[in-house]
Amino acid sequence: MQFIDLAKQQTRIRGAVDARIKTVLDHGKYIMGPEVRELEELFCSFTGAKHCITCSSGTDALLMPLMAWGIKQGDAVFVPPFTFFATAEEPALLGATPIFVDVDPVTFNMRPDLLEKAIEAVQKADPSIYPLPKAACERKLMPRAVIPVDLFGQAADYQAILAIAKAHGLKVIEDAAQSFGGSRHGKMNCALGCHAAATSFFPAKPLGCYGDGGAVFTDDDELAELLKSIRVHGKGEDKYDNVRLGLNGRIDTLQAAILLAKMEIFPQEIESRQQVAAWYAQHLAGIDGLVPPTVASGCVSAWAQYCIMLPQGKRQTVANHLKQQDIPTNIYYPKPQHCLAVFASLGYAPADMPAALHASENILALPFHPYLEESAVQQIAAALKEALA
Ligand SMILES: Cc1ncc(COP(=O)(O)O)c(C=O)c1O
């Protein structure tokens, strides 16, 4: 059994992909070819966002708006501790201090009430209000931005987060690397009212290309222009008229062409993901000791991952049992961000973020992709039942 079966998808779209690649090889515009603009227009109509600026990865999609806003040393950027490294890495790369805000134990997304506490703690440099990194206890950092993550495919609570951010003058980047194609209260992810949204087209993501790729979404005309400049080495009138520091942050024309072919079936795949999740919910129901994922009311998840929670100390035994039956599993994420060696100098203790710590110790991701059949889900459920008996 495959954890994510990209080969099944490729069989379905191979003709369309081949045709799209051939067109690129024929016109030869490998950098910023016509497919890039076509894809950006398609993404705007798909999400409802005013601007889409494609780029080289989900990581650069986070970095570019932070660069546009001049995030720097002395700034505080609020991020969840239970996520992929890039969410905290990008503000840190610019010299800002990541301030971790623990997650909800059910959705694994940032808790708005704790965000509010963390902002107050930073403003007063007072870790008795909320655990802070050392740098934020020693001097008052400037709260500048918050990057909530739509973990495993479901949107964070933007209604609450945007209200808090507005009250404190913070920019909000939706880290939608895992949630492209999902929605919240009828609005597509990446167009949920944040100042910017960043997504990833890494091959294993709900919409993946055959390499690296990403995109930033925004309704802000000025930010869109800055992002286009930063994407090409801070270009001004042309690429040899550099007016600011930037990146080589473009998506390849070939990757844009592949994404255009994949977009033909993407809405159907999002539907299929709902069906697979429903089969899991049905077949996992009633298995003692296992907590299946919960999608908050009003959210449609893009189901980047299907993660269950297991009782403390059981994960390795369960994973081994599944492996014996040729059922692969993964752990997202084995270490919360505040416990990573790279962030040791921040001085957090593991127990500062209890929900993230608990999740990292007990979570297990099961095989999930739009082509998973009900019989496979039944087999996985039966193996889990045996392992937990
Ligand atoms: C939550 C999150 N943010 C950011 C990224 C970075 O995306 P990329 O791998 O395209 O740079 C990922 C990808 O793994 C992710 O899962």
Image: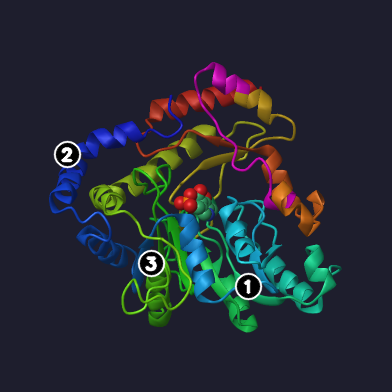
For marks 3 and 1 on the same chain, the one whose residue lies earlier in the sequence: 1
Is residue 153 visible from the viewing direction of this image? no
Whether residue 332 is in magenta: the answer is yes
Neighbourhood count class around disc 3 (C-alpha, 10 Å): few under 14, some 14–19, many 20 upward: many
For marks 2 and 3 on the same chain, the one whose residue lies earlier in the sequence: 2
Q: Residue visible at 67% across and 30% down?
A: 315
Determine whether 70 is above or below 64 in the image: below
Of the 4 image quadrants, the one containing the N terminus is top left
Main secondary structure along the magenta-highlighted residues = loop
Q: Residue visible at 58% across and 61% down?
A: 90
Of badges 2 and 1, nearer the viewer stands: 1
Which residue appears farthest toward the top when viewing the image?
324
Which residue is label 3 attached to? 232
Of badges 2 and 3, nearer the viewer stands: 3
Seen from the viewer's position, the closer of residues 118 and 242 is 242
Does the closest atom of ligand 1 sit within 8 Å of the Cβ of label 3?
no
Distance between the alpha carbons at the discs numbered 2 and 3: 32 Å
174 on left or right of 44: right
Of badges 3 and 1, nearer the viewer stands: 3
Distance between the alpha carbons at the discs numbered 2 and 1: 47 Å
The kind of residue tagged 2 is: Gly
Q: Which span of residues is magenta-colored?
A: 320-340
The picture places residue 3, in percent across and down from the top left corner, at 46, 31
Seen from the viewer's position, the closer of residues 271 and 349 is 349
Which residue is label 1 attached to? 72
The kind of residue tagged 3 is: Val
Q: Which mark is residue 15?
A: 2
Which residue appears farthest toward the right when viewing the image?
128
The picture places residue 126, in percent across and down from the top left corner, at 84, 72
Disc 3 element = loop
Is residue 61 visible from the viewing direction of this image? yes
Disc 1 element = loop
